[in-house]
Amino acid sequence: MPDEITAIEVERFLSDSQKNAETFPDMLALLFAALAQGSQNGVFDKCGGKWVEGAMEAESKKGDVYGKKIIGLF
């Protein structure tokens, strides 16, 4: 999380996320950008501090619940 975004600001935003997302879409965008950057930094750290080709794609696939077929639910 960037230093410019404090935990208090995030908690205040999330306390009424629906209203705040509509009123302050720039803060919502900043939160998503911070999450994306944090995800990339996590993959970078897992790869020993190096950018490994395909590592982000492989990590993203781990969370792809829509791409997987769930047998027996539908």
Image (cartoon, rainbow, N blue to C red):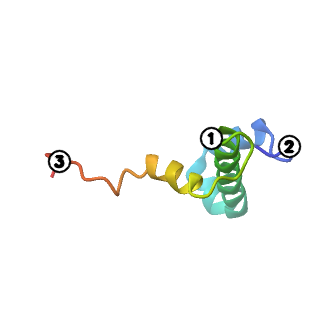
Badge 2 or badge 3: first in the primary sequence: 2
Helix, strand or loop status at disc 1: helix
Residues packed near mark 2 inside 10 Å, few (<14), some (14 to 19) or many (20 plus): few
- For the residues bearing labels 2 and 3, Cβ distance under 8 angstroms: no
Quickly name the residue at label 1: 15
Which of labels 2 and 3 is toward the front?
3
Rendered-image quadrant of the N terminus? top right
Q: Which mark is residue 41?
A: none
Judged left or right of residue 35, residue 4 is right
Nearer to the camera, 15 or 68: 68
**Of circles 1 and 3, which is in front?**
3
Question: Residue drawn at (31%, 53%), measured in percent from left and top?
Answer: 68
Type of amino acid at the residue the image marks with label 1: Ser
Q: What element carries label 2?
A: loop
Q: Earlier in the sequence, mark 1 or mark 3?
A: 1
Question: How much space separates mark 2 and mark 3, taking CA atoms?
Answer: 44 Å
- Residue beneath disc 3: 71
Residue 72 horizontal/vertical position (percent): 13, 46
- Nearest to N terminus: mark 1 or mark 2: 2
Q: Nearer the viewer, residue 49 or 23?
A: 49
Q: Residue 3 carries which label?
A: 2
Mark 1–mark 2 distance (CA, rounded to whole Å): 20 Å
Q: In this view, does 26 lie above or below 38?
A: below
**Which residue is at 76% across, 36% downward?**
7
- In percent of width and height, residue 19 lies at 60, 54
Circle 1 or circle 2, nearest the eye = 2
Residue 58 is left or right of residue 66, and the answer is right
Exactly how many numbered labels are in the figure? 3
3D distance between C-alphas at marks 1 and 3: 37 Å
Q: Which amino acid does label 2 sit on?
A: Asp
